[in-house]
Amino acid sequence: MARKTAQSAQDILMADFQALVSDTEKLLEHTATLAGDQADELRGQIHESLIKARETLQLTEESLQERGKAAVLATEDYVQSNPWQSVGIAAGIGFVLGLLATRR
């Protein structure tokens, strides 16, 4: 469920940023020819796109923080319930990292 929500938020974020880039390109193309109300309208559209992108980025950040906290809690629970296995896994990872470090 969380993975689908994160993927959906990521897709929305990408679409918002693509819209932002598109609007910025339009602004750059029309800067020389637009004046007055047309320029203000285009700036308003870009501003709205920026607001949407910021909101989506905030939601994505919150989702990632929640997933990170859940992963930390799951890891802590595993280590608490299986301390010797955790020590063995840590020792194995340390050994492999030591081997890789001495090869260089």
Image: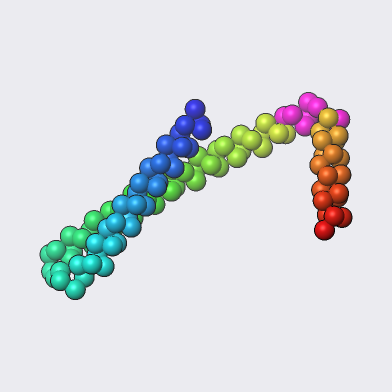
Vertical placement of 24 versus 48: above or below?
below
Residue at the outermost bottom position = 32
Give how far across and how far down residue 50 sits, in percent. 33, 55
Is 66 positioned to the left or the right of 43 in the image? right
Residue drawn at x 33%, y 57% as measured from the top left: 21
Instruction: Say how the picture is coloured.
Output: rainbow
Residue 63 lies, with reference to residue 54, above or below; the image says above
**Percent coordinates x, y for residue 98 in the rendering:** 86, 50
Q: Nearer the viewer, residue 66 or 5?
A: 5
The front one of 99 and 5 is 99
Q: Position of residue 72 (x, y in %)?
A: 66, 37
Residue 68, quarter of the rendered image: top right
Q: Residue at x 83, y 44 (%)?
A: 96
Tell which residue pokes out farthest to the top in this image.
Answer: 81
Residue in the image at 27% along x and 58% along y: 23
Where does the magenta region start and end?
A: 77-84
Count of marks, rendered view: 0
Q: Is residue 73 visible?
A: yes
User: In terms of secondary structure, what is the magenta stretch mainly?
Assistant: helix
Residue 37 percent coordinates (x, y): 12, 64
The C terminus: image quadrant: bottom right
Residue 51 appears in the rendering:
no
Up-down: is 46 above or below 71? Answer: below
Q: Judge from the rendering whether residue 61 lies leftward or rightward of residue 74; answer left or right.
A: left
- Taking the image as shown, residue 11 lies to the left or right of residue 66, namely left
- 40 in magenta: no
Given residues 23 and 76, the one toward you in this image is 23
Tell me: residue 56, above or below residue 82: below
Task: Identify the residue at horizontal 51%, vertical 33% (top origin).
Answer: 3
* Magenta-drawn stretch contains 82: yes
- Direction from residue 16 to residue 64 in the image, left or right: right
